[in-house]
């Protein structure tokens, strides 16, 4: 994937995350995601086949935020403690 492709993909995942958080899965619209990302609806389908597929990438991002990025520097390797901290 090119640098521009990575930026576009990232923008779509980011706006999809916001739409899914605000609207929920069933009410979130692909057209809203693409409008907020500043791309055409057709471009969405260059990167994703469906809303379910972008949801999968959003879920991976959220999982990463909860388990890695948000917990760096705490030095806590106990999974229970890490889970409790992530949920806070």
Image: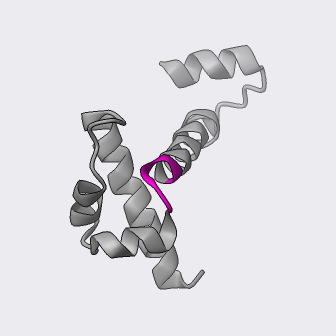
Image position, residue 88 (x, y; %): 47, 18
Dominant secondary structure (helix, strand or loop) of the stretch shown in magenta: helix
In magenta segment, residue 52: yes
Which of 86 and 49 lies nearest the eye of the viewer?
A: 49
Image position, residue 23 (x, y; %): 25, 36
Residue in the picture at 72% in, 31% down: 75
Q: Quadrant of residue 12?
A: bottom left
Quarter of the image with the N terminus is: bottom right
In this rendering, is residue 47 above or below 31?
Answer: below
Q: Quadrant of residue 63?
A: top right
Left or right: 38, with 5 as reference point:
left
**Over which residues does the magenta segment extend?**
49-53
Residue in the picture at 43% in, 56% down: 13
Residue in the picture at 77% in, 20% down: 78
In magenta segment, residue 50: yes
- Residue found farthest to the right: 77
Which of 55 and 66 lies nearest the eye of the viewer?
A: 55
Image position, residue 17 (x, y; %): 38, 46
Image position, residue 19 (x, y; %): 29, 45
In this rendering, is residue 9 above or below 24?
Answer: below
In this rendering, is residue 87 above or below 39?
Answer: above
Which of 88 and 4 lies nearest the eye of the viewer?
A: 4
Left or right: 83, with 48 as reference point:
right
């Amino acid at each position: 994937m090119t640098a521009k492709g990575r930026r576009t993909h990232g923008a779509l995942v980011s706006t999809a995350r916001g739409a899914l958080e605000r609207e929920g899965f069933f009410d979130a619209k692909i057209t809203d995601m693409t409008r907020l990302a500043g791309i055409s609806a057709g471009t969405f389908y260059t990167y994703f086949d469906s809303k379910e597929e972008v949801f999968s990438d959003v879920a991976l991002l959220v999982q990463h935020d909860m388990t890695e990025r948000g917990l760096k520097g705490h030095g806590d390797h106990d999974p229970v403690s890490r889970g409790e901290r992530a949920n806070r």
